[in-house]
Image (tube, rainbow, N blue to C red):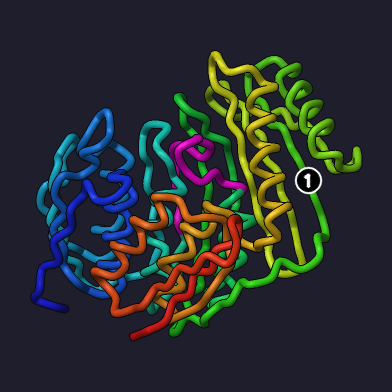
C-alpha cells in the first residue's frame, strides 16, 4: 500500500459526486490513499449526501478502510484502503439515491478480487441523474463480461424517485486480469426495443410516450411495449430504448417528471436515439463515461463515441491521478470521437 496521499479537488470539472466515486473505485484497486476536498461544491446541496455516504461505507466495508470525514454534508474525506475482500454484501441507501452508482464504486475492485461476491442493493434503481438498471444490465455489464469477469444481475423491484425502495442483486465472479476491449465498430443492428414503464400512474402516460416514439423513430410496431409495475413503493415512469448491434448493445432512457408532458419526455429520448443511430458510433455518451475506469484498469482499450460529456473529461483527470495511463481523445468527425487508453 502506497504511503503517498493523493489530493483531489472535488470541484474539478463538473464537480459532482462522480469525482468521489471514481476516486474510491481507483483507490480500492490500486491501494492508494486519497484526500478529497470541496466535495460536490458546485451542487445546490454541496457535500456528502446519503447515496455518497453509502458508496463510501460500501468501499470501506469491502477493504476495511480507514475513513475520516464520512458524515452527512461533509465537504472533505480521507480514505485509506486495506486489501479488498469479496463476499456477501448488502447495502441499503434508505432513500431514492442511486443503487447503480454504489455498485459502480465497488465493482472495479470486486471484479479483480480473490473471491466471488454477491451484492444486494436497495434504494433508487431508476433516477434521471444516474444510470438506470436497464443500462447497467444490458449495456454496461455485457462489456465488463467480455473483459474476463462474469457478472449476473437481477432486478427484484423498481425504485423510482422520490420513494426509492428498489432492489437488485449482482453476482460477481472475478478474473485475475482484465482483458483489453476495443469498441470501434457497431456492426449491423439486430434488435430495437422501446418500453414505457409506469408504476402507480395512469396508463395513458405510457401510451402517449409510445405514440410519440412510434411517430418519430419509425420502427416496426413489434418494437414497442408498455409495462405496468405493481410492486414498486412509489409512482414513477421510465421510457427505455434498447439498440442491440452485432458488437454492442446500447440503452437510452427518459424519465417522467411532474410538470413535464409525456410527449416531451419521448421527444427528448427519440432525439438522443436518432443522434446515436445517425452517428454510427458504437458507444453512447453515458457508456463512454462508465467504460473509462475498467479500460484504464485493463491497461488499455479504445472506443468510438459521441462528443464527450464533462462527466467523461472529469473522469479522465481523476483516473490520471491514480494510474499511469495515457488517455487520448481524438475528434474524427463532428459526432465521432475516438478514445484510446494505453499504459505509459
Quarter assignment of residue 201: top right
| Image location of residue 38, percent across then percent down | 15, 44
Report the residue marked by disc 1.
193
- Element type at mark 1: strand
Q: Tell me which residue sits at (61%, 72%) in the image.
A: 183
> On screen, 25 above or below 192?
below
| Image location of residue 230, percent across then percent down | 66, 27
Q: Is residue 15 visible?
A: yes
Along the line of sight, the residue nearer the viewer: 83 or 319: 319
Along the line of sight, the residue nearer the viewer: 123 or 25: 25
Quadrant in which the C terminus appears: bottom left
Q: Tell me which residue sits at (24%, 58%) in the image.
A: 60
Q: Tell me which residue sits at (67%, 47%) in the image.
A: 275
Circle 1 crowding by C-alpha within 10 Å: few under 14, some 14–19, many from 20: some
Residue 312 lies left or right of residue 44; in this view the side is: right
Along the line of sight, the residue nearer the viewer: 132 or 114: 132
Quadrant in which the N terminus appears: bottom left
> On screen, 251 above or below 23?
above
| Image location of residue 212, percent across then percent down | 77, 27
Q: Tell me which residue sits at (71%, 66%) in the image.
A: 186
State how many labels appear: 1
Q: Is residue 115 visible?
A: no
Quarter assignment of residue 42: top left
Asked if the magenta segment contains residue 278, the reply would be: no
| Image location of residue 96, percent across then percent down | 42, 32
Q: Tell me where the magenta segment starts and ends, as one range.
A: 119-134
Asked if the magenta segment contains residue 133, the reply would be: yes
Residue 241 lies left or right of residue 297; in this view the side is: right
Residue 28 lies left or right of residue 215; in this view the side is: left
Amino acid at each position: 500500500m502506497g504511503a503517498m496521499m493523493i489530493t483531489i479537488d472535488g470541484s474539478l470539472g463538473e464537480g459532482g459526486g462522480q469525482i468521489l466515486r471514481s476516486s474510491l473505485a481507483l483507490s480500492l484497486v490500486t491501494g492508494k490513499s486519497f484526500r478529497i476536498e470541496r466535495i460536490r461544491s458546485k451542487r445546490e446541496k454541496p457535500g456528502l449526501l446519503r447515496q455518497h455516504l453509502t458508496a463510501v461505507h460500501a468501499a470501506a466495508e469491502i477493504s476495511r478502510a480507514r475513513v475520516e470525514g464520512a458524515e452527512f454534508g461533509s465537504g472533505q474525506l480521507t480514505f485509506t484502503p486495506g486489501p479488498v475482500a469479496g463476499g456477501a454484501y448488502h447495502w441499503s441507501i434508505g432513500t431514492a439515491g442511486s443503487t447503480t452508482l454504489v455498485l459502480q464504486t465497488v465493482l472495479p475492485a470486486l471484479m479483480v478480487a480473490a473471491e466471488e461476491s454477491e451484492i444486494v442493493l436497495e434504494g433508487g434503481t431508476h433516477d434521471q441523474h444516474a444510470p438506470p438498471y436497464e443500462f447497467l444490465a444490458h449495456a454496461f455489464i455485457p462489456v465488463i463480461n467480455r473483459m474476463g469477469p462474469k457478472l449476473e444481475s437481477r432486478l427484484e423491484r423498481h425504485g423510482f424517485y422520490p420513494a426509492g425502495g428498489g432492489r437488485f442483486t449482482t453476482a460477481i465472479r472475478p478474473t485475475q486480469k482484465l482483458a483489453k476491449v476495443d469498441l470501434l465498430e457497431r456492426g449491423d443492428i439486430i434488435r430495437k426495443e422501446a418500453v414505457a414503464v409506469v408504476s402507480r400512474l395512469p396508463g395513458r402516460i405510457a401510451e402517449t410516450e409510445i405514440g410519440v416514439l412510434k411517430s418519430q423513430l419509425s420502427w416496426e410496431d413489434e418494437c414497442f411495449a408498455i409495462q405496468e409495475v405493481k410492486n414498486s413503493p412509489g409512482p414513477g415512469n421510465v421510457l427505455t430504448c434498447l439498440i442491440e448491434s452485432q458488437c454492442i448493445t446500447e440503452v437510452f432512457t427518459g424519465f417522467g417528471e411532474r410538470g413535464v408532458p409525456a410527449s416531451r419526455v419521448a421527444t427528448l429520448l427519440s432525439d438522443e436515439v436518432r443522434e446515436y443511430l445517425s452517428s454510427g458510433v458504437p458507444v453512447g455518451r453515458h457508456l463512454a463515461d462508465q467504460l473509462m475506469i475498467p479500460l484504464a484498469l485493463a491497461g488499455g482499450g479504445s472506443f468510438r463515441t459521441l462528443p464527450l460529456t464533462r462527466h467523461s473529461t472529469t473522469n479522465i483527470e481523476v483516473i490520471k491521478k491514480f494510474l499511469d495511463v495515457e488517455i487520448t481523445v481524438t475528434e474524427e468527425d463532428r459526432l465521432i470521437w475516438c478514445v484510446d487508453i494505453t499504459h505509459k
